[in-house]
Amino acid sequence: MGALQLHVFYLILLPTITSQVISKQGEWKSATATYTKQADASIITEGACGYGDLHKASYGKYSAGLSTMLFNKGSTCGACFEVRCVDHILWCLQGSPSVILTATDFCPPNYGLSSDYGGWCNFPKEHFEMSEAAFVEIAEKKAEIVPVQYKSRVKCERRGGMRFSMSGSAHFFQVLITNVGLDGEVVGVKVKGSKTGWLPMARNWGQNWHSNINLVGQPLSFEVTASTGRTVASYSVAPANWQFGQTFEGKQF
């Protein structure tokens, strides 16, 4: 095959290959789901992502703990999933309505129990531990576990801008990033003080990012990159007199 023929052949194939990749990202995948019983039917306790009170973090009842396969060592924290109950005539609500969940916690494995009964989050199962309030929007409350389908990296509906919560010390600066739009999954963060250029931050755990530099007394800007590749810079989010323990609101995707 000549060079010109090969080039034309590649151009013919390229749209087909691209469409296959896009459709694969939007496919429904199989998993299971249970729910956690809380006093107000939602999940409010601090989880493995470090969000603290999930109502204050704006996630509330639409929060979920993920099994090891989905949690991905915390990099999935903040990511949004669309989940629906399927293939169970007794437990699934008619029409298979779906909910959008935010990953906020880790559902640990329990190898003392069978993965088919009790060890729902055992590796390599894909499982969502939902709030009771969200669970009853897709399935009957009396169900112990239901088969579900999910889509990952779906659009998160957020109000307001991203939030930056400061913690650490003079020589260990840490920021927790919440209320993230797009698909909610942060893959990169940079910070800039008035005396520095843009400094890449390392993931500490969940969506806590840190830098071993003294930024006290400087107004701070943040650059956040989502898993889609989009980047948003929020300039001078925190004033020069910011304090550890404070939260500031920046731009949104």
Image: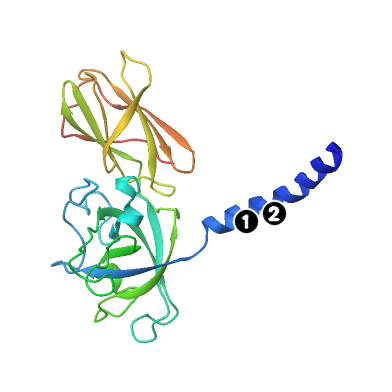
For this orientation, the residue located farthest to the top is 195
Q: Position of residue 182 (x, y in %)?
A: 44, 47
Q: Amino acid at mark 1?
A: Gln
- The residue carrying pointer 2 sits among few (fewer than 14), some (14 to 19) or many (20 or more) residues within 10 Å by Cα, namely few
Residue 84 pos. (x, y %): 40, 70
Q: Amino acid at mark 2?
A: Thr
Q: Quadrant of the C terminus?
A: top left
Going 49% across and 39% down the picture, which residue do you hit?
Answer: 229
Where is residue 238 shown, x and y percent of the image? 27, 27
Q: How far across and down, in percent of the image, does residue 56 sit?
A: 21, 50
Task: Classify the position of the N terminus by image quarter.
Answer: top right
Q: Residue at x 22, y 54 (%)?
A: 55
Q: Are marks 1 and 2 in contact (CB under 8 Å)?
A: yes
Q: CA distance from mark 1 to mark 2?
A: 6 Å
User: Compared with residue 96, is residue 40 higher up or lower down, i.e. above or below?
Assistant: above
Judged from this view, the residue extending furthest toward the bottom is 90
Which image quadrant is residue 193 in? top left
Instruction: Tell me: residue 149, above or below residue 106.
Output: below
Q: What residue is pinned by disc 1?
A: 20
User: Foreground: 61 or 107?
Assistant: 107
Question: Where is mark 2, residue-wise?
Answer: 16
Q: Is residue 216 left or right of residue 125?
A: left
Element under label 2? helix
Q: Nearer the viewer, residue 219 or 208?
A: 208
Asked if residue 13 lies left or right of residue 93, the reply is: right
The residue lying at 32 percent from left, 64 percent from top is 127
For label 1, the SS is helix
